[in-house]
Amino acid sequence: MARKKITIVGAGNVGATTAHIAAGRGLGDIVLLDIIEGLAAGKALDMSESAGVYPFSGSVSGDVEWRQAAGSDIVIITSGLARKPGMSRDDLLAKNAKIVQSVCGHIVRQCPDAFVIVVCNPLDAMVYTAARTTGFAKNRVMGMAGALDSARFACFISRELGVSCGDVAGVLMGGHGDDMVPLPRYTAVAGIPLTELMSDERIAALIDRARNGGIEIVNLLGYSAYYAPAAGAVKMAEAILTDARCVMSCCAWCETEYGVGGAFVGVPVVLGATGVERVVELDLNDSEKKAFAESAAHVKSLVAKIDRML
């Protein structure tokens, strides 16, 4: 059986880390692309040489030429400007929309059957841009954010409780921003509801930290996070390539689901061989419905700006 092919666009911190994790997971042949001459090739060579220490199947190559992406099964878009201190994700809207639009033009020409996973910000609006530009079926275009936000929430919970992070299953919905909607009622530690293990006050504090998890790292590093976002993107790609049918949060198209009425927004989904196989609809209470509706409205306002730009 032929190995799968994954193209990662952007050889910066997120892209290079995504390539390294994907190679280590043995997902297939990895192509790393970047417009800077030598950047992707150099990082890909370094990764390839690391296989002499910890072997992995599949190859890792880097280039500036899009023809190397031909026939890719999955394309992960990490290219775009990253946040700096004082910037919101929304501040990146216009510049990154143009970058994503250009990238997606290449995807249509070189790998028209690929699934597309978007990582760059503002995430939900960039997923919409990718879907609009490619014209691909909406189950084939998705965004990484929910996997990242859930991972951050799980990390903070595990540290608070002194338990394994792998035992925490966090659920978040809404846009990837300050108005994301963590759901403690549906978050559990080894099957035990979080609400049984932690006070409402501590849960609220961890929710606030999860919402501000991205800027916390930006303020510490001076630039955006990359290890956890890369891991989230690879987890999604692996679920599709292996038909794992994993249930995880990601940015996906919602029409009638949750009354969204047509938008890409963070929801729990089933990811498998056909991409987003279905949206998992939870029974939200009134306060959760209100918070999700407000978050979805913010996403739609960004999309309206995209429509005026492109």
Image (tube, grey):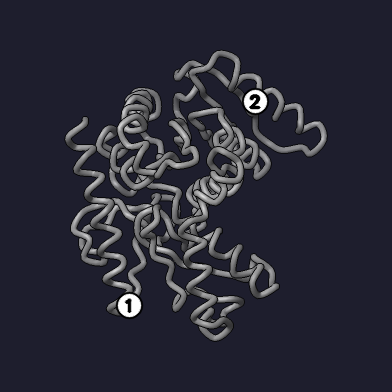
Which is more toward the observer, 79 or 156?
156
Q: Is 21 displayed left or right of 82 in the figure? A: right
Q: Amino acid at mark 1?
A: Asp
Q: Quadrant of residue 294?
A: bottom left
| x then y, percent, for residue 170 | 51, 68
Q: Is residue 193 above or below residue 240?
A: below
Residue most extreme to the front: 86
Q: Quadrant of the N terminus?
A: top right
Which is more toward the observer, 75 or 308?
308
Q: Is residue 18 above or below residue 189?
A: above
Q: Is residue 186 above or below residue 173?
A: below
Q: Report the residue marked by disc 1.
A: 283
Q: Quadrant of residue 280?
A: bottom left
Q: Is residue 73 visible?
A: no
What separation in Å lies between label 1 and label 2 (alpha carbons)?
45 Å
Q: Amino acid at mark 2?
A: Ala
- Residue at image position (53%, 68%) is 206
- Residue at image position (29%, 37%) is 129
- Residue at image position (32%, 54%) is 265
Q: Quadrant of the C terminus?
A: top left
Q: Report the residue marked by disc 2.
A: 44
Q: Earlier in the sequence, mark 1 or mark 2?
A: 2
| x then y, percent, for residue 32 | 55, 27
Q: Is 166 displayed left or right of 209 in the figure? A: right
| x then y, percent, for residue 165 | 65, 66
Contact (Cβ within 8 Å) of mark 1 with mark 2: no
Which is more toward the observer, 257 or 271?
257
| x then y, percent, for residue 297 | 23, 57
Q: Is residue 207 visible?
A: yes
| Badge number at residue 88 | none
